[in-house]
Image: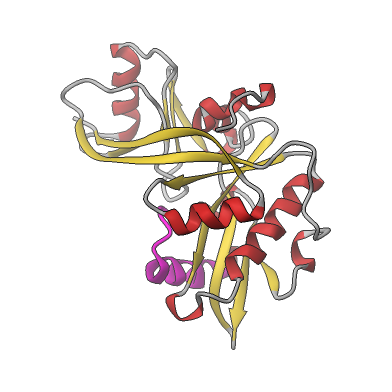
Amino acid sequence: MVNRDGQAAALDDPVGESLRGHHAHLARRLGRAATYLPEVATFSAVTADPGPQEWADLAQLLGRGEFADMFSCAAIPPSDWQPVFVLEGRQMIWPGGSRPDHPHGETVTGVVELGADSVPEMLDLVARAQPGPFWPRTHELGAYLGIHDNGTLVAMAGERLRPPGWTEISAVCTAPEARGRGHAARLITALVARIAARNERPFLHVAEANTDAIALYERLGFETRKQVTFRGFRTP
């Protein structure tokens, strides 16, 4: 694992760093707790050592019985918060100082940028490919790129969390009938080029059980920085 990069400290709290920085305009806050606006993302953030008041603020911010996706936050909420899921995964980063062979996003063959008018087809693809959380306003987090086949969106990937100096690649998915054609690799390569062009570094998260995705990311040049545990809860 790679965990010696001093620039990677922001990746220890990617949700909080994003909500305090690049995504501040998409944040809701109460006290020291924060979360994204509805239909953008369900990720929430607290400080490294939250006390009872901070958890109470987050519960009030979200509302009674609402879902709190704590992402990779290691802090555990009070006992009256209902656990929803625990998922083992890893955080992977693009090596510093290297750039992909392709010069920029849309120059990769067949890759196009997806905008607000693409949301219906993006949501349809997500329903078929099941890449993970994606909501009607998730595309506002960053650039999303796609590949069409005979007018139908069959693959996409985009930018999600944005801690200082970094951009997360997420929502990498391909329709079942279009898999095995290299679409994911082309999209990731395009995004890496975009991110590197603005002097940021790409990173991503992947479930530990998704060995095919891990193998793809490693072939493309990503390295594991650390293991993470994703957790979700329901507020009291």
Q: Taken as a whole, is the magenta stretch helix, strand or loop?
A: helix
Quarter residue 219 falls in: bottom right
Q: Residue at x 41, y 41 (%)?
A: 89
Residue 112: x and y in percent read 69, 70
Q: Residue furthest right?
A: 103
Magenta range is 118-134
Residue found at x 62% / y 46%: 222
Q: Is residue 127 above or below residue 78?
A: below
Q: Quadrant of residue 56?
A: top left
Instruction: Give the quarter of the figure containing the N terminus.
Output: top right
Q: Name above or below for residue 235 compared with residue 223.
A: above
Q: Which is more toward the observer, 219 or 153?
A: 219
In this image, 129 relative to 104: left or right?
left
Left or right of 92, for residue 109: right
Q: What residue is shown at x 37% (from left), y 14% (from top)?
A: 50
Question: From this viewpoint, is residue 61 visible?
Answer: yes
The question of residue 120 being in magenta is answered with yes
- Above or below: residue 117 compared with residue 162: below
